[in-house]
């Protein structure tokens, strides 16, 4: 029983009149290198050459794949044929391994592109991130929604906002569920618009994208929900979401206090400010050198009319680390005390302190 891979080629050799079996086999082996070269060039014309050319070993087997398959011949009634077929047998086994290696290597190339894209975006190198994201989408292998989303993010940051926004819109349609991170991005953008412009115009779209964002535990999404409920006059639900967000960022207590202030709910306003005070005191206790937390605590104490404590925390921060940031905060505090004072000498003293702490603080002049 014979198993020919290119019977026509071998049969044509059998028809050579007067040629011995050895001669016919010699003709085959002389022909093989030329066929191998052509096959190698054919394989190299595709993107696979980047894989095959990475090492001489891979390229060697790459050029042997096609010709040995097509000249492979086994005859069970002539054991001598087996010796002549050994190169084809080896090449046949090699091609199976190489095929697996090629596909696996293609996936690894795409994965390297993907890792480089993620790293570039984390470092804020969006041009570089865009380059590798485009390579991921064009490389051999399956790209996914995450790959397209990364490309859109890079485009939004590199003066290709229209193309980037189009990808986001495709990933997160306005009428059916799509890619959750894209819904999240659209929701946060809509929350900003709803907070600044016509709230009713964006509220329902905001609610739809929030419901498909699948990120309900983050501070940003909790805040976006609060914006939605404020826009739809559901104040208590908005405050509840802000309280949850304030557990991660105490500045939201100030927003709650402002909401209660607008509703003439003085007791609730003071309660929210006290919650902010407790949260910032704990943060300053954990890290006394954190000037942003110390400044936020001082502002909270000022809103509670605890001015002496506010000044003390700011001066302690100045003693720990004398920076323009803490000096500007002290200048603002002194100007606040100047505005609140009703005594001329005291006003003059605070005004002078404000200038002394930060000579470039223009509101003090």
Image (tube, grey):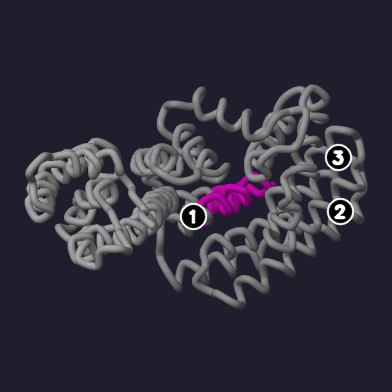
Between 118 and 199, the residue placed more toward the observer is 118
The local crowd at label 2, few if under 14, some if 14 to 19, many if 20 or more residues have their Cα within 10 Å, is some
Label 3 Cα crowd, 10 Å radius (few <14 / some 14-19 / many 20+):
some
Q: Residue at x 79, y 44 (%)?
A: 225
Using the image as rendered, state which of residue 320 and residue 10 is in the foreground.
10
Q: Name which of mark 3 and mark 2 comes first in the sequence.
A: 3
Instruction: Judge from the rendering whether residue 206 lies leftward or rightward of residue 144; answer left or right.
Output: right
User: Are the residues tagged 1 and 3 within 8 Å (C-beta)?
Assistant: no
Residue at x 30% of width, y 59% of height: 75
Name the residue tied to disc 3: 229
Give residue 227's position: percent from left, percent from top.
78, 39
Crowding near pointer 1: few (<14 within 10 Å), some, many (20+)?
Answer: some
* Magenta stretch prevailing secondary structure: helix
- Can residue 126 be seen here? no
Q: Position of residue 77 (x, y in %)?
A: 30, 63
State the image coordinates of residue 149 (x, y, percent, origin top left). 54, 40
In the rendered image, residue 223, in percent from the top left (x then y), is placed at: 74, 47
| Front one among 307 and 115 | 115
**Splitting the image into 4 quarters, where does residue 115 fall?**
bottom left
Residue 240 numbered mark, or none = 2
Image depth: mark 1 or mark 3 in front: 3
Residue 198 is drawn in which quadrant? top right
Q: Which residues are magenta?
A: 330-350
Residue at (65, 56) in percent of width and height: 299
Question: Which callout, 2 or 1, points at the residue further toward the start of the chain?
Answer: 2
Q: Earlier in the sequence, mark 1 or mark 3?
A: 3
> Disc number at residue 353?
1
Q: Is residue 92 magenta?
A: no
Q: Secondary structure at mark 1?
A: helix
Image position of 335 (left or right of 355): right
SS state under label 3:
helix
Q: Check contact, mark 2 vs mark 1: CB within 8 A.
A: no
């Amino acid at each position: 029983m014979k198993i020919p891979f290119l019977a026509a080629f071998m049969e044509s050799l059998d028809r050579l009149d007067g040629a011995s079996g050895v001669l016919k086999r010699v003709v085959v082996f002389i022909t093989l290198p030329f066929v191998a070269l052509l096959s190698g060039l054919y394989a190299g014309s595709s993107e696979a050459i980047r894989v095959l050319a990475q090492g001489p070993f891979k390229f060697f087997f790459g050029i042997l794949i096609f010709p040995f398959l097509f000249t492979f011949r086994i005859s069970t009634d002539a054991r001598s044929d087996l010796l002549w077929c050994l190169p084809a047998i080896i090449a046949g086994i090699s091609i199976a391994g190489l095929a697996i290696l090629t596909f696996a290597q293609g996936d690894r190339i795409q994965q390297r592109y993907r890792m480089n894209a993620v790293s570039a975006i984390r470092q804020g190198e969006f041009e570089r991130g865009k380059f590798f994201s485009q390579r991921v989408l064009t490389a051999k292998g399956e790209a996914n929604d995450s790959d397209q989303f990364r490309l859109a993010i890079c485009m939004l940051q590199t003066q290709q906002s229209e193309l980037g926004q189009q990808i986001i819109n495709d990933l997160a349609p306005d009428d059916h569920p799509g890619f959750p991170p894209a819904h999240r991005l659209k929701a946060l953008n809509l929350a900003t618009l709803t907070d600044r412009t016509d709230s009713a115009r964006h509220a329902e779209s905001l609610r739809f994208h929030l419901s498909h964002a699948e990120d309900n535990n983050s501070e940003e999404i909790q805040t976006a929900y609060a914006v939605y409920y404020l826009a739809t006059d559901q104040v208590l639900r908005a405050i509840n979401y802000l309280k949850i967000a304030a557990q991660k960022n105490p500045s939201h207590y100030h927003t709650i206090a402002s909401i209660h202030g607008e509703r003439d709910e003085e007791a609730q306003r003071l309660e929210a400010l006290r919650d902010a005070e407790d949260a910032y005191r704990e943060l300053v206790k954990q890290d006394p050198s954190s000037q942003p937390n110390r400044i936020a605590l001082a502002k909270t104490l000022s809103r509670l009319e605890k001015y002496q404590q506010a000044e003390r925390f700011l001066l302690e921060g100045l003693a720990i680390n004398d920076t323009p940031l803490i000096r500007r905060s002290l200048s603002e505090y002194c100007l606040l005390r100047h505005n609140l004072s009703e005594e001329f000498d005291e006003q003059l003293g605070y005004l002078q302190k404000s200038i002394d702490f930060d000579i470039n603080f223009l509101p003090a002049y």
